[in-house]
Image (cartoon, grey):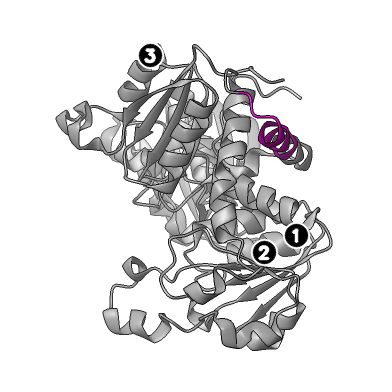
Amino acid sequence: MEFRNRDIVSIKDFTKDEILYVLKTAKKLESRPNPSLMKGRVMASLFFEPSTRTRLSFESAMTRLGGQVIGFSEPGNTSLKKGETLWDTIKMAEQYADVIVMRHPVEGAARLAAEASGVPIINGGDGANQHPTQTLLDLYTIQKAKGKIDGLNIGFLGDLKYGRTVHSLATALTHFNSTLYMISPEALKMPESYTEELDRKKVKYYEESDLMKVIGKLDVLYATRIQKERFPDPMEYKKYAGVYKLDKSMLPHFKPTLKIMHPLPRVDEIHPELDNTPHALYFEQAGNGIPVRQALLALVTGRIK
Amino acid sequence: MTGKTLKISAIMDGTVIDHISAANTFRVAEILNIKGSGNVVTVGMNLESKSLGKKGLIKIGGRFLTKQEVDTIALFAPEASINIIKNFEVTQKFRVEIPDIINGIIKCANPNCITNAERTKTNFRVLDKNPLKIKCHYCERVIGKENIELI
């Protein structure tokens, strides 16, 4: 499979085989770390918008493979302030690096950057649009915990309307044969453009607002934060904040093998008292960002075929 | 029928855009920027039409449309037909057709799309022709007919 020089912009660009290939490569790198695989290679880390997890895990992934990292973690000190276009910034960065990882607040920025750049672009999030490496690490997490991605009952909980990670993961899951349970308040339901796609791909899914009605069926529960910044009216936010709270009182209802995931940061969707139960998978999930991003870095630079 | 023939043959060389649904006539005129051109132009509104009830018609002397112009007309008046007139004869007649890819004609309706932030050509894939639904190549947003706007 040819990944060399490929841009990682959108999960929609991936076939099922390509997704599985990335996961397989990640697994190899996790079981047999290779601290000199990216020796002599430079990754530009261009964060036009701050991000903790994504930036740190990319930089850690590259460093642990023996590569070097250059870049910025917010646009404050860069020539962007002087009005430089994204196109020009990328044209400059490609001269200095073998691969560019970027996050940008404007949707479609990564696609445009990929057109500007001669070296591969990896999208670390473009506004509300795509965050493909998050989706790949989510899939990796499910596969690692469950041994498979097919044939599972996967619940999505919380803000399914605005949650980018949920949209991308649901899109990726259309390649697999799992059943999806969309659990959200009516006002935060998954947008039709996504459910239409699930219909088109004949994915079995249910929409439900009462978590307790479906909790016992789930193998995986992907919880999300209800994002305050999405609500112009604080009263409206208050209405939905804390609608779903996972805590110890729910343990008797969980399948013993239920795994809870969360893209983090969490607010109060998951009580810390669940952190030490076998259900908690969210910190391991964040950790899985390392092998998955290492796999992508190595594949697009041609260090692994 | 005689009336129709007369109208079409009234220009020596040029283009007749026929079967524009009445409501879209001015939109098409706007697309072709006929105000700014020095060509002889006739605009007919609310003409009788068997298929559309009322239709619009635009005749432009001495001008032949580019593919981009025809594609743009298709987006706003998908029922329109184009007649190319040479030496008073209709030499070519065809229905406009919505292309599969729309390059650079329209604006992305998502204000937070990179094409609205940085000077770059827009690009859309047509998902559905009726009703028209397109998807931005950059921000991946799906846009319905009601939000389609010319650049």
Pointer 1 local density, CA inside 10 Å: few below 14, some 14–19, many at least 20: few
Q: Specify few, some or many for label 3: CA neighbours under 10 Å numbering under 14, 14-19, or 20 or more.
A: some
Residue shown at the point (65%, 61%) measured from the top left:
B51
Q: State left or right for residue A213 relative to residue A135.
A: right
Total marks drawn?
3
Say which quadrant the N terminus of chain A sits in. Answer: top right
Q: Secondary structure at mark 3?
A: helix
Residue at screen point 69% across, 88% down: A213
Q: Is residue A26 magenta?
A: yes
| Residue shown at the point (73%, 32%) measured from the top left | A28
**Label 3 close to label 2 by CB (< 8 Å):** no
Q: Amino acid at mark 1?
A: Arg
Q: Which residue is mark 3?
A: A96
Quadrant showing the C terminus of chain A:
top right
Q: Quadrant of residue A252?
A: bottom right
- The tag on residue A200 is 1
User: Magenta span: helix, strand or loop, mainly?
Assistant: helix
**Residue drawn at 61 percent across, 39 percent down:** A292
Could you say whether the residue bearing mark 1 is in a helix, strand or loop?
helix
C-alpha span from label 1 to label 2: 6 Å
**Position in image of residue A295 (x %, y %):** 63, 31
Q: Which residues are magenta?
A: A23-34
Q: Earlier in the sequence, mark 1 or mark 3?
A: 3
Q: Is residue B53 above or below residue A101?
A: below
Are circles 1 and 3 on residues that touch, CB within 8 Å?
Answer: no
Disc 2 marks a residue whose amino acid type is Glu
Give a yes or no on whether discs 1 and 2 share a subunit: yes
